[in-house]
Amino acid sequence: MEKIKFVIDGKEVEAIRDQCVLDVARQNGIYIPGLCYNPEVKFSGGSCRLCLVEAHQAGRMSLVTACNYPIREGLEIKTDTSLVKRIRKGIIELLLARVPDSDVIKELAAEAGIDEPRFVKDEGENYHSKCIACGLCIQVCEEVVGVSAIAMLNRGPDKTPGTPYKKPSEVCIGCGACAYACPTDAIPMEDNGDTRKIWGREFKMHLCSVCGKPYIPEAQIDWIVKTTGKDRVFFDKCPDCR
Ligand code: SF4
Ligand code: FES
C-alpha cells in the first residue's frame, strides 16, 4: 500500500493512495457531514451529497463528494469554505423538505442555521417522512447479508426502498441489517417478545438457552447455517452468554 501526503484544511496528513477523502478526514478528526457512506459497504456513498468539499489540484478547483474521491499526490482539500457551506446548506434544505421528520436531518439543519426550508414539503403519494433514498439499506442487504430482499422502487422524487411489489418478501431473513444501517432511522422494525416485524413479515426469534432472551430470528440462523456451514448449536446461547 503506497503512502502519500496531501493537504486538508491547511494541514498535511498521510493517507494510502486512493483512500477516500472522507475516511482520512474522519481519521484525522476533521468533521465532514455524510449520511449515505459506510466504510464497511463497498458500493456505498455518493448519494446524499452532504460530504461535498473543494478539491484543488493542478491549479484547478472542483466540488467533489469526499466519500468517493480518491486521494492522489498534490491534492489539497478544503472542507469548510464559504462556497462549501453555502452549497451544503442548500442540500440540507432540500433534504429537510423531503424528510421533515428525520431527527438527523433536523440536527444538520439546526447546525446550518435553517429553521424552515425554502422548498415545499413533499407530501405526494410516496411521501416518506424519513427516507432520503440513499440506497444504503439495499447495499447492506445485498453486499453484507447476501440476501437482496429489497430494492429501490419508483423513480425520481418517489424513489424509496421496498420489497418487490411491496409484498412481504419471501427471501428476507428478518436480520434487520437494513434498519440498523439506515442513517435516518427510516425502516420500521418492531421486536415484541419472541416476534420481530419488518418489511410486512413476522419472524420468530430464537431464545437464548441460558438467559431466555430472544436474540436472533430463526430464519437468520437457517440462512447462516445454509451459507456458511456453521453448527446450529452455536446459536443456542446469545453473544452475552457464550
Ligand atoms: S431506508 Fe434508510 S438506508 Fe434505505 S434508502 Fe432510505 S434513508 Fe437510505
Ligand atoms: S456521504 Fe458522501 S454523498 Fe453521502
Image (tube, rainbow, N blue to C red):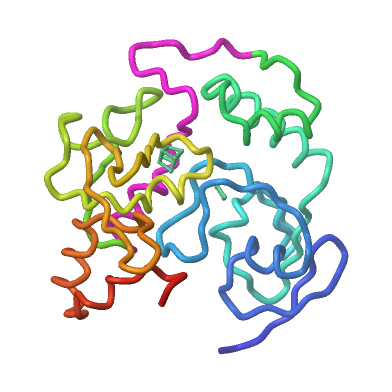
**Main secondary structure found in the magenta portion:** loop
Q: 33 left or right of 135?
A: right
Q: 170 left or right of 150?
A: left
Against 125, residue 112 (above or below) is below
Residue 199, percent from left and from top: 27, 36
User: Closer to the camera, 156 or 145?
Assistant: 145
User: Closer to the camera, 153 or 85?
Assistant: 153
Which quarter of the picture shows residue 141? bottom left
Q: Is residue 122 one of those drawn in magenta?
A: yes
Residue at 57 percent across and 46 percent down: it is 35
User: Closer to the camera, 28 or 3?
Assistant: 28
Residue 205, percent from left and from top: 27, 52
Against 186, residue 5 (above or below) is below
Judged from this view, the residue extending furthest toward the right is 10
Q: 195 left or right of 22?
A: left
Image quadrant containing the C terminus: bottom left
Give the magenta part as a residue range: 119-144
Residue 236, percent from left and from top: 27, 71
Residue 128, percent from left and from top: 42, 23
Residue at 35 percent across and 18 percent down: it is 126
Against 123, residue 54 (above or below) is below
Q: Is residue 41 one of those drawn in magenta?
A: no
